[in-house]
Amino acid sequence: MAKTTLDAEQLVSQYVEIWNDQEFSRLSDVVAESFTFTSPTTGTIEGRENVEAYARDVVAGFPDFEITVHEMLADETLVMAEGTLSGTHEGAFDGIEPTHETLELRDMARFVVEDGKLQEERAFFDRYEFLEQLGLVDE
């Protein structure tokens, strides 16, 4: 039986809450074991355990990392979420030593829902703007 649109939106809301609360051990509540995450800074990460390790790396680099969702559009198997990613670069991340700069990026994320779990997330944001906000782009 297919899940309702509300269920798909609730899964994404719970996923965002897990990120914001930094309770990554709860990812198994909402994402499939074979979950795939793709973003401009990471490429593609496959598997829930690897995504959890990546999430822990993100908050090690940006301890105050937060996702703010502004709007969601959904059907039973697809959710699009527009939001803002924010945080302060206080630790090493992706080979970049802390810059202590604040980041605030608009993003769009596409989620695929199947069998009551998130199967995939593709995050879209401007990598150049990411590096620029961290003070890593020469003017």
Image (cartoon, helix red, strand yellow):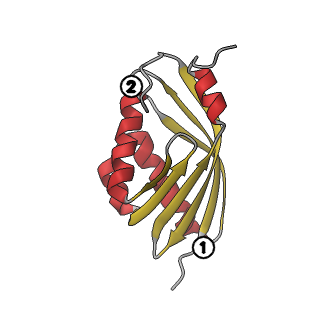
Q: From the image, which quarter does the C terminus lie in?
A: top right
Kindly identify the residue that appears in the image at 61 percent across and 67 percent down: 78
Q: Is residue 60 above or below residue 7?
A: above
Is residue 68 or residue 49 the one in the foreground?
A: 49
Kindly identify the residue that appears in the image at 48 percent across and 64 percent down: 118
Find residue 25 and report its horizontal and vertical position in percent.
Answer: 29, 51
Is residue 106 or residue 129 the one in the foreground?
A: 129
Find residue 103 and report its horizontal and vertical position in percent.
Answer: 56, 26
Q: Residue furthest bottom?
A: 1
Find residue 99 and report its horizontal and vertical position in percent.
Answer: 48, 16
The answer to whether residue 89 is seen in the rendering is: yes
**Mark 2: amino acid:** Ala
Decide: few, some or many residues near mark 2? Use Cα within 10 Å; few <14, some 14-19, many ≥20.
some
- In the figure, is residue 59 to the left or right of 40? left
Q: Which residue is mark 2?
A: 92
Q: Which residue is mark 1?
A: 76
